[in-house]
Amino acid sequence: MAFSKVRTALKNRIHATLAKYALNSAEHSDIFVGKGRAWLDRTLKRFPPETGRCIDQELELLDATMEQIYALEERMLERIQLTSDMQRLKTLPGVGNILAIVIEREVGTVDRFPAAGHLAAYAGVVPKVHSSGGKTRYGRMRKQANNYLKWAFRAASCKGIEAANVVVAHRHHAPWREKKVTLVYERIR
């Protein structure tokens, strides 16, 4: 979780710098891997020297952070056998091996929660509710929650949202026009 926050912060800083100089890559869905990364490396030459150096350092930190994340995930997969509960969790959109492990280990036995609402509150996925005089107002998400579960559920939902955003952003580009997911999006839209 801590490494994911660092990774996100570094990516956000790089995206912010690109936006500041009105540079973006419409043809690459992820500028940090593959052809997107090659585009980013070429784009570094267009920045003022100090700005380019700072982005280069942020990319080095990002690469080191990603290595740590991969090593940690690999270690988790080596040491933890996927249970039937974890396999069931993996059927949820956005939940892979790592998130299934985190969710299963942090929830424990679901029988310890008297109702689904109690588990949702424990996981921090329900907002505060203020009711008075027949009116109900929903506030921010609860801070008193299991932060690992909160992170895992947020990560799972973000993966689905990120995937949908990629389709929306790239549906007009030639390689994407005939993809099934784009056709489904256009039909539903």
Image: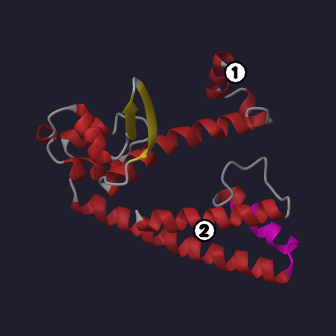
Q: Nearer the viewer, residue 2 or 53?
A: 2
Query: Which residue: 69% across, 34% down?
Result: 168
The region drawn magenta spans: 37-48
In the image, residue 121 lies at what x, y percent? Answer: 29, 42
Drawn side of residue 59 relative to residue 17, left or right: left
In the image, residue 66 lies at what x, y percent? Answer: 50, 68
| Overall secondary structure of the magenta section | helix
Drawn side of residue 147 relative to residue 26, left or right: left
In the image, residue 89 lies at what x, y percent? Answer: 30, 38
Is 44 one of the magenta-colored residues?
yes
112 w.r.t. 20: above or below: above
Query: Which residue is under mark 2?
Result: 10
Residue most toward the front?
133
48 w.r.t. 186: above or below: below
70 w.r.t. 121: above or below: below
Q: Classify mark 1: helix, strand or loop.
A: helix
Query: Which residue: 12% across, 37% down?
Result: 111
Drawn side of residue 130 relative to residue 59, left or right: left
